[in-house]
Amino acid sequence: MKPTKQLHQTIINQCKNNDAKAQMQLYNLYCKAMFLIAYRYVKDRFLAEDVMQDAFIKAFKNIDTYKNEVAFGAWLKRIVINQSIDYLKKNKLDLVSINDEIITITEDENWQIDCEISADEIVDKIKLLKEKYRLVLSLYLIEGYDHQEIAQVLNITENTSRTNLLRGKKLLREQLKDTSYAARY
C-alpha cells in the first residue's frame, strides 16, 4: 500500500524515538476525539478516560508498527475502539452467538427515518440499547465497519453481527417512532 502523507509526521517520527514531549503533543492533538470514541462505547466518563489512556499507551508502545498506510488518527481510532471493546469483554459483556444454520437473515438496508429527528437524538437512542445491539450499530453505522470486521472485533459470527444489527435497528426504529409520535402530540 502507498504511504499516506501525514499532517503530523514529524511528531510521529519523534514518538517512534520515544520522545516524551512529542508523545504529549500527539496526545494533546488526538485526546478529545479519542475520548469521545471511547465514551461512545463504555458510556462512562471516567472509564472512557481510562480506556483512552490505555489506548494511547498501547499506541505509543506499538508506534513502530504504524506504517503510514492510513491516517494516524484512523490507526489510533482503531486502537481506541478495540481497547473499548476489550474493556467491555473483560467486564462480562454478553454477546450470545447464534447458530448460523438456524437463522438466515436478509439484510434490510432501509435506514430512512423521519427527517424531524436529529442525529443527536438517534445517537442518544442508540446509547439506550442493550450492549450487543449498541456495539454492532455503533461499529456498523458510526465507525463504518463491515460484518466481517465486527465479527472479528467482537469475537462473534458474521451472522450474529447481522442479526444484532437488524434487531438493534428494529428497536431503534421503535424508539425513534415513539420520539417522533411524542413530539407531534
Image (spheres, rainbow, N blue to C red):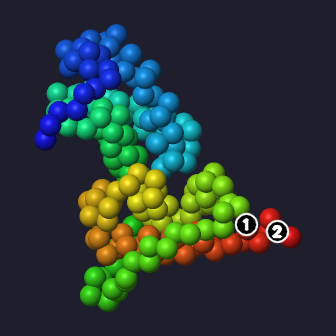
| Residue 132 figure quarter | bottom left
Q: Quadrant of residue 147?
A: bottom left
Residue at the disc numbered 2: 184
In the rendered structure, find residue 179 and report the number of the disc placed on it.
1
Q: Amino acid at mark 2?
A: Arg
Image coords of residue 111 (percent x, y): 52, 69
Which residue occupies the extreme right position in the image?
Answer: 185
Q: Position of residue 174 (x, y in %)?
A: 64, 74
> SS at mark 2?
helix
Observer-nearest of 171 and 48: 171
How far apart marks 1 and 2 lie (CA) works out to 9 Å
Residue at position x 55%, y 48% from top?
Answer: 43
Question: Considering only vertical position in the picture, is 155 above or below 90?
Answer: below
Q: Which three-letter amino acid code belongs to the residue tagged 1?
A: Thr
Q: Residue at x 46, y 62 (%)?
A: 137
Q: How many marks?
A: 2
Answer left or right for 28 relative to 185: left
